[in-house]
Image (cartoon, rainbow, N blue to C red):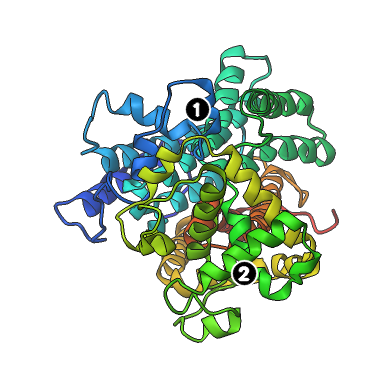
Amino acid sequence: MTTLVIKNFRFYFYALIFFQISIFFLIFGPYELFNLDLNVYKDSGDGPSYLNFSFKSAQSILGDHRTFGLPLFLKVYQFFDKDLLHWPKFNYLFYIFSINFFLYSLLRAGFNSLFSFIGCFSLLISYNFYVYFSYWTEILSIILCILSLSFFFLILSEHKNNLFKYILFTFLIFFMYQVRPSFIVFIIFPILYSIISNQFLNTKYNSISFLSMCFVPLIIFLILRLLLVGNFGLVSFNGGPASNAIILLERTDIKNLKYENQLFAKKIIEKRKKIPFPCNLEKESERAIYISGDLYGQKTCWNEYFMLAWMEAILEHKGITPFPKDDPRNIDAWNHTKTLGVFFSQAGNNVGPDKILLNFAMDVYSENKLYIFKRILKSPYHFLRFYRDFYTNQFLLFYLVIFLFIIFYKNDPKIKLTKTIIDKELIMTFTGFIIWILNMTLFYGHQNGELRALQVQNFFLVPLFFSYFTYLLIVKKNYINPGN
């Protein structure tokens, strides 16, 4: 039987490029196997808030409910493609470039070639991401995260300092969470990885320098926002916790809230009664009856309450509404327009409304700490159930690839592996696991466990699991010394 002994890493790159070209034609034609909606909706949804982002002053940039990363990127991109006609293709090509570069960096850093290839190949065939090629922040934040980690591992692979790579790594990881603020969780990865590696593999990585590269730009940015717009945070956008707080009101004795939050809660409760059924119902159990399907730990009507709270805060602070003041459509304005992005952009600086929402949310959260903690504990279970139910075919594809490697792969005797269980592949997997737990905490505590956002935030989870599982099953089991 023919065996696959990889003596030249070029095999992996050639294989990856072959699949990338094939997938391009399956997505964009002429075959269009996936039948995706790759239209770029510039005038609806979130489009206007990114495309009409104001760069007039530092205050407008730092006080907006959006971070400046994607709007700035789009400004540059539109020099070449003004109408965003090729935005999906650009995102795909940028995505596969980042995967190829990631494979190169892993191999340079001394990771096992099979482990590296399976991880990158899994990223490529994660077809649940393909629909995001026409979206805004989703795929770009993934690309920037992959590129950031690529430069991190390239830095680790070199024995001397390379200022250019340090600067590029710092810029990429900063720009990553300026495109999608929730990706700020990933700045912990380089620090954790270097600390754990130093502890268990006796490496001499400079964890302090990575700490500085990841956190100094962030601290400077936070201080600038505090000085210029009076808000200490990555962005003035706390509609998520406020929406959770509305859901938690049924468990909350409003009399225990601060006076201003009691007033805000009463206004919300009255307006909630007027929005469309079933979101006008008071109790979560009542609303859930009318929602079909498994919610996987999400709460009902979260998006509606998000908009309701945000518009009420804008009304209270700025006195403006999407429609004329007495127009009944203001109660559920999101149902009467293609997008509220234009209204939110016209509302301008979001710091004032954001403070109202944050103050209200934290007050309600403090009354429901145990309930929120229990919900976070259950979040990994809900997320894994979701992946099990929706990505069966993707898992089958991964299993097929592993099966083929089991049959045809043979270890190269010239490649020496550590005989201990703990190696850099395990440390990378374990560090990724910690990031996943932090993501669960963020998205079920701060947000609603919204499945689209969770898929994007945990883009690495399945590829990392399959790469280590394949490596352990095919390569590592033959080298582990049971006595160690």
What amino acid is at disc 2?
A: Ile
Q: Could you tell me if the residues under marks 1 and 2 are in contact, i.e. CB atoms within 8 Å?
A: no
Say few, some or many: other residues with alpha carbon within 10 Å of mark 2 (under 14 / 14 to 19 / 20 or more). Answer: many
Q: Is residue 337 left or right of residue 313?
A: left
What amino acid is at disc 1?
A: Ile
Residue beneath label 2, please?
A: 247
Question: Is 264 drawn above or below residue 435 in the view shown?
Answer: below
**Residue at (49% x, 38% y) in the render:** 66
Residue beneath label 1, please?
A: 61
| Quarter-of-image position of residue 182 | top right
- Label 2 sits on a secondary structure element that is helix
Q: Nearer the viewer, residue 353 or 386?
A: 353
Report x, y in % for residue 61.
50, 27
Q: Is residue 13 left or right of residue 272?
A: left
Q: Nearer the viewer, residue 445 or 416?
A: 445
Report x, y in % for residue 366.
79, 60
| Quarter-of-image position of residue 107 | top right
